[in-house]
Image (spheres, grey):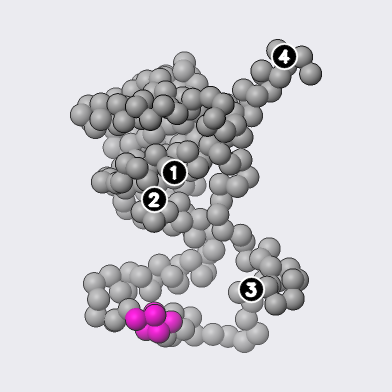
Amino acid sequence: MSNKFREGYNEANFRRGEKTLENKKIRILIADDNDEFCIILKDYLNNEGNFDVVGVAKNGIEALKLISESKPDLLILDIIMPHLDGLGVLEKLSLNKDSELAPKIIVLSAVGQDKITQNAIKLGVDYYVLKPFDMDIFIRRIKEMFSITLDQKYFVQKPENMINSNNGDSTNSFKQSEPVDLESEITSIIHEIGVPAHIKGYFYLREAISMVVNDIELFCSYKRVISFYC
């Protein structure tokens, strides 16, 4: 393999998240209209040594322009921005056929509505982080993103591919032989782990569990949001 070909191959692998932090700095583009926040975040990232902030966009249109020009490895994107919001940027990027060079994306926003979060995840966001957040954990998550392949970014196996630890056979762990009263079952489990029914948010918790049981793909979305706070 020639040196020139090897360099091109390594660059492509790095763009796909397959190259480790030890070999090259992560090129980061920040898209957020909060000037003060951008300055703080940029300084923090640049001082880490593993990162190189290649640009700061103050609106969605500018973000798309800088993505095309600087070809960052990671886009840190706010949802609420002038001219074109974060979801608009994600929609434009999702139409990009050159997915090999598309950046990984972290949404960093004060907007935590479920519908917006789910739409962002469907449009290809790797993580959705709510402000305020722990900067050290945020940095750690970025490093984790670039030390694994894209195939490993989803942390939950689909139930049909899960392994039964008792016999080693591939089996659907959620398969039931007879109908189950899901709401009663969830209520019982919540009670067993010590969550009182009068606690604030109890019904939201029960509804969220019910949604995940009925659509296991949602768990990937919730996992990528809450993992920042673990």
Residue placed farthest to the right in the image?
Answer: 1
Residue 47 lies in quadrant: top left
Residue tagged 1? 141
| Residue 109, placed above or below residue 200 | above
Q: Earlier in the sequence, mark 1 or mark 2?
A: 1
Helix, strand or loop status at disc 1: helix
Report x, y in % for residue 72. Answer: 48, 24
**In the image, residue 196 lies at what x, y percent?**
29, 81
Can you say whether 141 is above or below 114 in the image? Answer: above
Is the residue marked by circle 3 packed among few (<14), some (14-19), or many (20+) residues within 10 Å? few
> Which residue is disc 2 drawn over?
228
Q: Secondary structure at mark 2?
A: helix
Circle 4 — which element? Answer: helix
Amino acid marked by disc 1: Arg
Q: Amino acid at mark 2?
A: Phe
Q: CA distance from mark 3 to mark 1?
A: 29 Å
Provide the residue designation for mark 3: 173
Q: Nearer the viewer, mark 2 or mark 4?
A: 4
- As drawn, 172 above or below 92: below
Question: Do callouts 1 and 2 mark residues in contact (Cβ within 8 Å)?
Answer: yes
How far is mark 4 from mark 1, CA to CA? 32 Å
Label 3 close to label 1 by CB (< 8 Å)? no
State the extent of the magenta-drawn residues as a range.
189-194
